[in-house]
Image (cartoon, grey):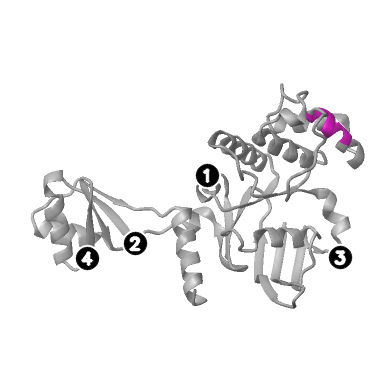
Amino acid sequence: MIEASGLRKVFRNRRGVTRVAVDGLDLAVPGGGVHGFLGPNGSGKTTTIRMLLGLAAATAGSMRLFGRPVPHELPAVIGRVGAVVESPKFSPNLSGERNLRLLAGVVGAPPTAVTRAIETVGLTGRERDRYKAYSLGMKQRLAIAATLLKDPQLLILDEPTNGLDPAGIREIREMIRGLGEQGVTVLLSSHILAEVQQVCTSATIIGNGRLLASGRVEDLVSGSDSFRVDVPEAEAEAARAALVAAGLEATVDGSGVVVDTDRPGEVTRALAAADIWLTGLTPVRRDLESVFLELTAEDRLGRGA
């Protein structure tokens, strides 16, 4: 759905000072499902999205949407793309439904598209309330409803849960998951990693405008280099000492012990030699947040930060 190769964006201020916002970025978003576009604030996510949508000119590199080069052929594909990049402007004194009907007339969408979009984003029953009475989460849902009027195949959302309370974040998350299940490809830009892991099927992680990792979420978080060892609480400290004596790094964690190793056989052997019998041995799975922090920390070290 989205391809970028060697994408670069350099900003120059009035004094001639340059700042590299995107630095040779490669990006590939497969069709179907929800793809997370992750990075710290200021890492180049919004700038990349603006270049893909023709809102900013790339300094170098190439981009494609649906296999068509953009921005040169953007008019040919933009009708298949919906995007929420900045705070949308709606008439505050009109209802949510009326705002959508005005937009539908502009884009040539049928009246049924308005009803369908309202249902999809969960505003049924509140569609006739004035926009200015909407909560921040409802305003965000109306913005997404506006992008759905033309039944897009690709939906690009830039930090859609910014400023929302936990209930609002959950509502937006469930809605995005539903869109992905319906066959819409969603590019979800965010820095809230716990939320992304719950909704995304694949992800790209960037730092300082560069690609750090990309792939299926389950592959990014796979692998474990530590295990939790469950033993009787009274033997936790003895278990730790036995593992350390065997050359392993181990710490007591509650009633168990966490040991850094990718060879569980060493754990059972060391404990058996000390006449300690474990009741459980569980890999400590990484989450997307830990992967993200590792990658961005390595990137900062690599740049001498």
Query: Which of 184 and 249 lies nearest the eye of the viewer?
Result: 249
Which residue lies most toward the left here? 275
Measured in 3D between alpha carbons, the distance from the residue under mark 2 to the one under mark 3, in whole angstroms, is 47 Å
The answer to whether any part of residue 270 appears in the image is no
Q: Earlier in the sequence, mark 2 or mark 3?
A: 3
**CA separation, marks 2 and 4?**
12 Å
Q: Say what amino acid the circle numbered 2 marks.
A: Asp
Disc 4 on helix, strand or loop?
loop
Question: Which residue lies under the disc numbered 2?
Answer: 225
**Which of the 4 image quarters holds residue 29?**
bottom right
Instruction: Tell me the residue that label 3 is attached to.
Output: 72
Disc 1: which residue: 198
Give the quadrant of residue 251: bottom left
Q: Marks 3/4: CA distance?
A: 58 Å
Magenta-highlighted residues: 96-102
What kind of element bears circle 3?
loop
